[in-house]
Image (cartoon, grey):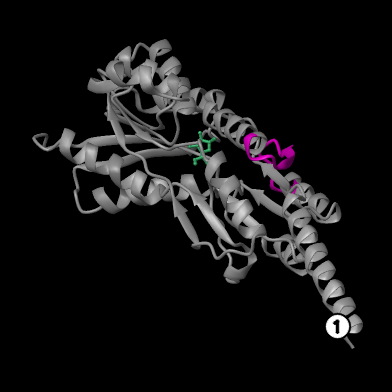
Amino acid sequence: MEHTRRLALRALIGGVLSLAALGAHAQEKQITLGFAQVGAESAWRTANTVSVKQAAKEAGINLKFSDAQQKQENQIKAIRSYIAQKVDVIAFSPVVESGWEPVLTEAKNAHIPVILTDRSIDVKDQSLYVTMIGSDFMEEGRRAGRWLEEHYKNDAGPINIAELQGTVGSAPANDRHSGLMEIIKNDPKFKIIASQSGDFTLAGGKQVMEAFAKTYGKQINVVYAHNDDMALGAIQAMEEAGIKPGKDVNVVSFDATKGGFEAMIAGKINVDVECSPLLGPQLMTAVKDVVAGKQLPKRIVTNETVFPMSVAAQILPQRKY
Ligand code: GZL
């Protein structure tokens, strides 16, 4: 009897130890993350890519990375490939808000959790993604609108705005426009006399501003550019048309990149609404939490502010992108 009990106890201890070892081994299994990036359209995007890659390395996460050249079909292809490779988690920055249900349903059916970074999507089934990590673009638009209200508070107007929109259908373009409208819609002195997409690129911003300068010339009081790259392109176009950006025309921009700060110091951008691309560390924490089975909030908003040109020279040395 005693001998049997001893054998049973030994087997039990052996089992517990091997389970513990298995558990420990399971925790050591490297996580593989498939990340489908929008493209390389802007300085913001380049900084975002650097942040994701650096953070994956520091977190010991195996990163599979793709660049979609700003085409939704390429992002969908990349996500399908990550599903086929059975990655642990998929993350991406959706180039546009719509058209994601089919491929995200495939990820859900494959039991691969999806994390959104930077831009959001418009889906009925909220279970198609775990969380969205990124800026509140509506609030960014409101901040720009509040700056305009304050800047022109003693000016009866009319204040004519030429808008350089970001990528058509993208969350930042939709919301930076809507956020602005929320603030100025009840103030008749503000009027958007022209609005066209420059697709978040410097070349696009320059091309659109060349056309605006030809058509509207000195009628334009404000250029409202959805990112610094388009603002910098518009500055080139204004100067070629004999318009002084930052003086004849107030330039409002978004991202607060190094290029934006340098243009503010040169007096060519009047205010830059910050939008942080440094999402890598938050993404990797979320990836590890998802794999560990932890609950995540549906929305993780990045903290950011507004920089008027008056503070640009003092702040630039502290900037990380
Ligand atoms: C905003 C991001 C936008 C930036 C642009 O979070 O999606 O895309 O404002 C970038 O510079 O191209």
User: Against 286, is 259 above or below?
Assistant: above
Crowding at dot 1, Cα within 10 Å, few <14 / some 14-19 / many 20+, comes out as: few
Picture residue at 72% right of the left edge, 54% below the top: 27
Q: Is residue 35 magenta?
A: no
User: Against 75, is 12 above or below?
Assistant: below
Which is nearer the eye, 27 or 175? 27
Please tell me in which quadrant of the rendered image residue 53 appears: top right
Q: Residue furthest left?
A: 154
Q: Is residue 61 magenta?
A: yes
Q: Position of residue 121 (x, y in %)?
A: 57, 57
Q: SS of the residue at dot 1?
A: helix
Quarter of the image where the N terminus is located:
bottom right
- 169 vs 39, left or right, is left
Picture residue at 67% right of the left edge, 58% below the top: 291
- 267 vs 276, left or right, is left
Which is nearer the eye, 84 or 123? 84
Q: Which residue is mark 1?
A: 5
Which is nearer the eye, 232 or 136? 136
Q: Is residue 244 visible?
A: no
Which is nearer the eye, 187 or 279? 279
Q: Which residue type carries mark 1?
A: Arg
Give the number of marks.
1
Picture residue at 70% right of the left edge, 42% below the top: 61
Q: Position of residue 251 (x, y in %)?
A: 32, 26
Please tell me in which quadrant of the rendered image residue 11 appears: bottom right
Q: Position of residue 269 (x, y in %)?
A: 33, 22
Magenta part of the chain? 58-73
Q: Position of residue 151 (x, y in %)?
A: 17, 33
Picture residue at 60% right of the left edge, 56% below the top: 289
